[in-house]
Amino acid sequence: AIGFYPGFSTTSDVADDEQEGFDQALVIKFSHVVAENTPKGLAAQRFARLMSEKTDRRVKVEVFPNAVLYNETDEMDALMRGNVQMIAPSFANLSEHVPAWLTFDLPYAFLSDEAVQEAFDGELGKLLFDKLASKNLVGLSYWGNGFKQMTSNRGPLIHPSDFKEQHFRILPSKVIEAQFRQFDAKTTPIPFNEVYRGLESGVVDGEENTISNIRTKKFYQVQKYMTISNHGYLGYTVLMNKSFWDKLPGDVKKPLVEALEETAHWANENAIEMNRRQLEELRHQGGLEIHVQTPEERREWMQRWEPIYQEFEATIGKDVMSRIRRLRE
Ligand code: LMR
């Protein structure tokens, strides 16, 4: 059952009578796994504030960061059961439920921030949202984080051959698994908030992530090498349970859509700036040996990864693949 809070009703006669209908706020619980000072953490807080302002505090968005309520392995169930009303999983986590979402994990699918924004705002973004309905999900917004970099303890990651036999923590995405397989590396999916321990104890040698996640979860303390490869994109889909969404009255839906739109606009700019600034911080503080991938090295990685596009064409779907190919041109 969907957990509506006391004082909240979807019947129009009560909703019209706001004195009675909204004597207590509607609470929307928003759960995520990253730190507060990150692109997603700050976007969630901003959305909560905008929602409060736009509804005169009749809707209260409570944000739970750092997986304090749920981690990525159980947040989807929590959303389905109505224990939380909003989550913003990374595309890779969503791909476990709807395979077309693997598209965002394809290596070098996006070669610039502009291409990412075009995907979010254009046909590809809409098509992927449409594919959520069959899972009783509504995609409400795209929030970017940034491009992923490679990190490791065992050795610098310059050429594909450097990955051989190294063991990487991955998100549970078939495409990301294939990406490392192409480089003869081993992989294990590990929930985000256990990655630090996994790297520290040597269960895995390395991982891939955005600068923001590497910095705020202190992976740099347990990694020696980082390659600025920008080889994949990490972003989020702001999701609601469709049954919950369908029951929301218009005077909640409207400000919610507006607040999300304003947030996304700000968040996607902010994410670029945060990752840029935090890379400078990582550079200054030392400890990590940072290699910036050259164009020749990029071509080498791209070439080795090209077969992945063919391999996943059927799983992702031709409709989605033709759009990603167009964006890459
Ligand atoms: C990760 O698990 O590495 C990321 O998906 C975490 C996040 O939500 O940014």
Image: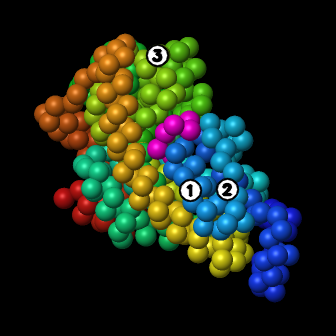
- Structural crowding at the residue carrying mark 2, measured as other residues with C-alpha within 10 Å and reported as few (<14), some (14–19) or many (≥20): many
Whether residue 118 is visible here, answered yes or no, is yes
| Quarter of the image with the N terminus in it | bottom right
Q: Position of residue 60 (x, y in %)?
A: 70, 58
Instruction: Answer above or below: position of 16 versus 299.
Output: below
Task: Say what amino acid the circle numbered 3 marks.
Answer: Gln
Closest to the observer, 275 or 149? 275
Work out how far the residue at label 2 is from the one at label 3, CA to CA, in angstroms: 34 Å
Q: Position of residue 107 (x, y in %)?
A: 32, 44
Badge 1 vs badge 2, beta-carbon distance below 8 Å: yes
Closest to the observer, 306 or 60? 60
Instruction: Answer above or below: position of 190 versus 100.
Output: above
Question: In the image, what residue occupies the spot 43% across and 35% down?
Answer: 212
Q: Which residues are magenta?
A: 35-40
In the image, farthest residue toward the bottom: 13
Identify residue for label 3: 221
Element under label 1?
helix
Q: For marks 2 and 3, give the one nearer the viewer.
A: 2
| Quarter of the image with the C terminus in it | bottom left
Identify residue for label 2: 61
